[in-house]
Amino acid sequence: MAIKIAQLSCGTEYSGVQSEIEHAAQTVGGKMVYPDVAYDDIAAAVDEFGFDPASPQLKLMIARAKALADGHYDADAVFISSCFRCAEGALVRNEVRKYIQEHTRLPVVTYSFTERMKSAQLLTRMEALVTIVEKKELLARERQVGLTAGIDSGSSTTKAMIIQDNKIIGKAWMPTGEVFGTAMEVLNKAMEEAGVRQEQLEGIGVTGYGRFLIGKKLNANLIQEELTVNSKGAVWLADRQKGEATIIDIGGMDNKAITVRDGIPDNFTMGGICAGASGRFMEMVSKRLRVDINDLGALADKGDWRKVNMNSYCSIFGIQDLVTSLAAGNTVEDVAAAACHSVAEQVYEQQLQEIDVRQPIIQVGGTSLISGLVTAVGDMVGSHPIIPPNSQYIGAAGAGLLASGFLEGI
Amino acid sequence: MKVFMVPLNSLILYDLIERFGHEPLSLMSEMRDRVVNAEIEAPPLNLTPEDVKVGLNYAGIEIPSGIRGRMSIWGPLLDKAEAAIIMHDMPYTYGCVGCHRSNTLLNHMVRKKDIPLLEVHYPNDDDEAKILVARVKAFLEGLNGN
């Protein structure tokens, strides 16, 4: 039976994106549903909620949220959405999200759209919602068993990890080129390090942008979006399987902020509109400063971001700020620090406002190796993030861990 | 005359405008055309992202897409209008259950247009309703002399 995703939204029909939302849900085995509310209940719901928006559709959104919270309507997950750039919609969206999380245990995702939104942009989010509901037992897995491989085909790099009896025995990464070819290359390297052959592998898990292609060709046991896989990998690597945490992954193309409870995600945001807040921007900065990306973090740690004005959402304008700052005589250390601060600030402003940040913060992904960026994120959230060992391999680790769930029939 | 009305799907105003010999410019007829048009596959309103671009003629790119989508339908209707009636203070379920910002923008655009305009308030009782009908009637009859 299809997973019921309750839609609490404003503006989707008139933005021409409603059919895209429904298509995305159907593609991953979900079904959008719309909680029924009686006309007389709307005013009472708004009154009890304590936020009275002027727009009637937002009032309806609140009443639908209350119907879910009161158990008058049955759903498995919640999708909360409103128009990008609408202040009233953003306020209600955020308050409704908090309300749902306070009153239910339903997984939630929020999204602000424009008319350009296509179902493909929602697929990962919808797939994650469906996975959290459908594969709760698999996601509860805390130990890896047997001999498995995990592959994470990311937008910038492809990673592979070989795990045996809960221990990492091989790993490799390289920049993503041709998707399947790169995946095979890193898998072979990781297997070589582990001293195993492909036919010995008892399970394979694949995540990331290239998951469908690679998973199909390798006949993988698990082909899964990166939101749930990365969160599992993060808590496993950080040894934080119990309790709450927030996972921040500043990726090459998009950023993820995921809150977890006992290792299972319950709220997440995934951004990717502006490249000024991406790992790719860090690469551009290191190239322009003519330093190796591995040295960028240490360089930033020596600088003072306050001396440089850099806060553009756009990577091109960000580089323009960088060029201007260098021309004005700023040091490369200060510029590197400003670049890290700019990315952290945008992640804080754009994404961490969409979730309730829970301590501890676990920062993962390739960018978590840039110490200056970790420092900047720590300054934003008020505590230094935990960087688990092999933090750049979380996707591969999570895929390998979850793939082992199939060996024991979950 | 072609008479525009706010809210655009008011059955009361539609009936009065038609009854007094004018042509109501209504959302209902616009939406009907879209919903029965089998060539478009974008339920429930059959409004596509291309339509939303039409809204750019009335609201800039920095305006939320939901407002531009509404303006893509409302705007061309307003362009045809030769007179208009705006109803204020109606219950939120009267007319289009939608976006207050869009309604505010629409009212402003109607006022800016140099056409005969009547602004009335939603009646709270029978006496106010009778006054409302009388005012609308007088306005519509007056248009005939223009």
Image (spheres, coloured by chain):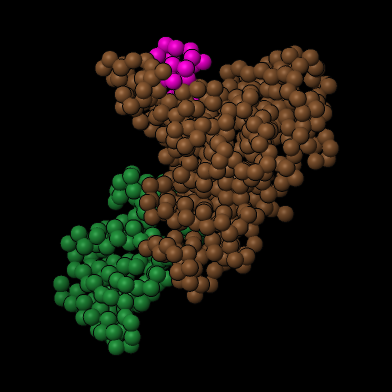
- Point 35% across, 73% down: residue: B90
Chain ID, green in image: B
Residue A45 falls left or right of residue A173: left
Q: Position of residue A246 (x, y in %)?
A: 57, 39
Write down the quadrant of residue A277 in the picture.
Answer: top left
Work out which residue is located at the far front of the displayed protein and give it. A383
Q: How many marks?
A: 0
Q: Position of residue A386 (x, y in %)?
A: 57, 31
Q: Position of residue A160 (x, y in %)?
A: 68, 22
Residue B23 falls left or right of residue A222: left
Q: Toward the viewer: A183 or A286?
A: A286
- Point 30% across, 20% down: residue: A325
On-image quarter of the C terminus of chain A: top right
Colour assigned to chain A in the rendering is brown
Write down the quadrant of residue A379 in the picture.
Answer: top left
Work out which residue is located at the far left of the displayed protein and give it. B146
- Point 38% across, 60% down: residue: B99
Answer whether residue B144 is visible to the viewer in this image. no
Work out which residue is located at the far bottom of the displayed protein and give it. B127
Magenta span: predominant SS is: helix
Residue A396 falls left or right of residue B91: right
- Point 17% across, 62% down: residue: B114
User: Does the magenta run of residues contain A372?
Assistant: no
Residue A144 falls left or right of residue A28: right
Classify A330 as above or below A216: above
Q: Toward the viewer: A276 or A300?
A: A300
Answer whether residue B146 is visible to the viewer in this image. yes
On-image quarter of the N terminus of chain A: bottom right
Classify A119 as above or below A185: below
Residue range of the region highlighted in magenta in the rendering? A279-301
